[in-house]
Amino acid sequence: MSLLDLHHSGSGTPILFLHGFTQSRTSASDFRELLAPAGDIITVDLPGHGDHATVRSNLADTADLLAASLSTPVAVVGYSLGGRIALHLALRHPHLVTHLVTIGASAGLSSAEARAARQQRDDALASHLIAVGVETFLEEWTRQPLFAHTRVTSAERTSRLGNTAEGLASSLMLAGTGTQEWLAPALPSLAMPSTFIAGAMDMRFSRHARLLAAGASGRCALVAGAGHAAHLDQPALCAALVRRALA
């Protein structure tokens, strides 16, 4: 029996939405509402987040837990951490993924040295998170240049404050970018329609989106006026791109 509970909110084409780090299944409500006409939006608290704050899991195992939870193939839309998990789900369980869409995701870091250095930084950040608590950490996290174009609404902030320091720290240590295997060599095996989205003002992840699209023979789409959290910065534009990708 899976440790992960899926929440359905509609009918029609099943669309699994995977949130980012520090978020939860109730995050990105504006984006999800705009996406809702496309089908049944399925949400889930990822390990270390929300109702699954006590679940400990790495990227590959999380993909396996999601696969065990699914009773039918789904279109998968994942943002950042959720996008990296979506990639793992598509690569490990391709029969369960009809369409793959990522927002602000990457194939990981290509060198072992870079992965080790990133993991060391994430472990230190996890220790800091536990020391200062969720509220202070979220203020620091959202002040990063990566989120310079993102306005965190009161609803979004409330959603994130429902997380625990221990849960978020475990996500950093077990499923951070430094733990991720370099996925680029496996991308050509993706046969489902794939679209890789990034905010046009997020130069780093725009490059990642192009690399993912080239490797998977998929489509790259950039959201005008958006940074890393394109679905929060420009929910209508991002939802339109996702709906087009799933059509």
Image (cartoon, helix red, strand yellow):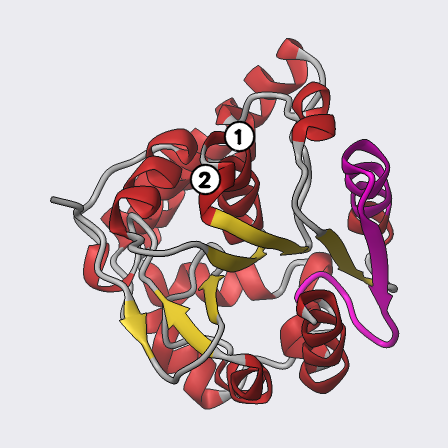
User: Is residue 209 located in the magenta-colored stretch of the structure?
Assistant: yes
Q: Are marks 2 and 1 in contact (CB under 8 Å)?
A: yes
**Residue 80 relative to residue 68: left or right:** right
Q: Quadrant of the N terminus?
A: top left
Where on the picture, by quarter, is residue 6?
Answer: bottom left
Q: Nearer the viewer, residue 123 or 132?
A: 123
Residue 16 position (above or below residue 63)? below
Q: Judge whether residue 211 can be spotted in this image.
A: yes
Residue corresponding to mark 2: 125
Residue 187 position (above or below residue 9)? above
User: Is residue 216 located in the magenta-colored stretch of the structure?
Assistant: yes
Q: Judge whether residue 131 can be spotted in this image.
A: no
**Residue 75 relative to residue 207: left or right:** left
Magenta region:
207-229
Residue 77 image point, x, y percent: 56, 60
Assign a secondary structure to mark 1.
helix
Q: Nearer the viewer, residue 141 or 204?
A: 204
Residue 54 position (above or below residue 133)? above
Residue furthest top as drawn: 112
Amino acid tagged 1: Arg
Residue 155 image point, x, y percent: 43, 87
**Residue lying at 59% horizontally and 88% vertically, measured from the top left:** 34
Assign a secondary structure to mark 2.
helix
Q: Which mark is residue 121?
A: 1
Where on the picture, by quarter, is residue 53?
Answer: bottom left
Residue 156 position (above or below residue 246)? below
Question: For mark 1, does the 10 Å Cα neighbourhood hold few (<14), some (14 to 19), or many (20 or more) residues?
Answer: some
**Residue 208 relative to residue 86: left or right:** right
